[in-house]
Image (cartoon, rainbow, N blue to C red):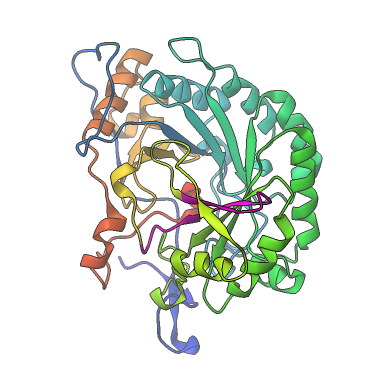
Amino acid sequence: MQPARRRGFADNAPMSERTIPIVDHRYASSVPQVPAHALAAGGLLSDRLGRPLHDLRISITDRCNFRCRYCMPREIFDGNYEFLRHADLLRFEEIERLARIFVGLGVRKLRLTGGEPLLRRGVEDLVAMLAAIRTDDGDPIELTMTTNASLLARKAAALKAAGLHRVTVSLDALDDALFRRINDADFHVSAVLDGIAAAQAAGLNPVKVNMVVQRGVNDDQIEPMVEHFRGSGAVLRFIEFMDVGNTNGWRMDQVLPSADVVARIAARHALHPLQAAAPGETAERWALDDGSLEFGAISSVTQPFCRDCNRARLSMEGKLYLCLFASHGHDLRALLRGDATQGVAAIDDDALRAALAGVWSARDDRYSELRGLAPHGDGERRVEMSYIGG
């Protein structure tokens, strides 16, 4: 049966003829195999390309109060769209259990994302549970969150008190009219700026501000963003418009290469490159010579960094994805709860640890490196940004 389709902007046809496939959460997935013997403790876990497991990004809701066109276009995510039932979401205790096991496998950074994670009721409680996790050596892990910041002003202090270390805020324009068009939900930019200020006041620093740059849409906001955040202590990051999912109408001609972004800034400001802060870092780091601003350029399209990718992503319903551009997930909820329909029984922590190690050890994903070899796409339905988080 062919998926239903709606009017939209997913291809290069005239606007009146373009279509977007209706999306749902039934992405291809399978239950990981559980090895017959428990995984021996110790040692470094790596995938087929020798990449370690270091970051786990955890989506805790598929809901968002924005309708940004590159992520949750209103033509798809309208009043008729069926989000997941609460019972389908991983419970906080399940998220904590998985996170604890992942930390035992080498994860040192947890990032909460969505949808919009601040829409999940009791998110502060989850933060406190995750903040209590320690490595085998007794060290704390880094705990961060990505948010659109529309609700951050009222929650920043509680999140900090619960143990959150810092936040990353999505902000694609400072011009209020343009920002309202981009979020397509009539949110004013002042709400996001208030959230950033509250986060800084609460000590969730350094606040990182992410801007997805689209040629002809918001690229005129690059310099205003630089000027606004100079001297603020925030770190700017400019992200190339990526072909995540199938509904955002991605076209290569809307990608403004990061090199062009850096060149535009360099035309007005003296700047210099910075060393990477950590292995697997996605952003090429720069700073203005006067010390007033650090910014980064994330170039997944024009300069892929797959060879250093050390991140896994967990969806709100417990599917593990090994790449932002994945088309197949690994159903961990079935292992947590058991699933009679699939003939799967719930397993203990040792077996779960062994299963997760097996999944990562078999990983060979490198979509961005291969993108140019398949200019017309690979024909597979990739997971949506709104479902897996950024």
Q: Is residue 218 visible?
A: yes
Q: For residue 120, which quarter of the picture?
A: top right
Which range is magenta?
284-302
Q: Is residue 159 above or below residue 78?
A: above
Which residue is at 33% across, 56% downward?
A: 304
What residue is shown at x 71% (from left), y 31% (from top)?
Answer: 159
Nearer to us in this view, 208 or 321:
208
385 shown above or below 213: above
Is residue 45 left or right of 205 when viewed as pictured? left
Question: Residue at 26% of width from left, 47% of height from top?
Answer: 365
Residue 126 percent coordinates (x, y): 62, 27
**In the image, 213: left or right of 119?**
left
State the quadrant of the N terminus: bottom left
Number of callouts: 0
Q: Is residue 19 above or below residue 81?
A: below
Query: With 54 as the anchor, is 33 left or right in this view?
Result: left
Please state which of residues 35 and 269 is positioned toward the viewer in this rendering.
Answer: 269
Residue 354, given in percent of the width and then of the height, sits at: 28, 20
Residue 58 painted magenta: no
Asked which quadrant contains residue 318, the reply is: top left
**Residue 294 falls within the magenta-colored stretch:** yes
Instruction: Measuring from the top left, give residue 192's x and y in whole percent.
Output: 74, 54
Along the viewing direction, whichever of 11 and 169 lies nearer the viewer: 169
Residue 371 falls left or right of residue 112: left
- Which one is nearer the viewer's eye here, 160 or 338? 160
Is any atom of residue 184 visible in this view? no
- State the residue at coordinates (43%, 47%): 282
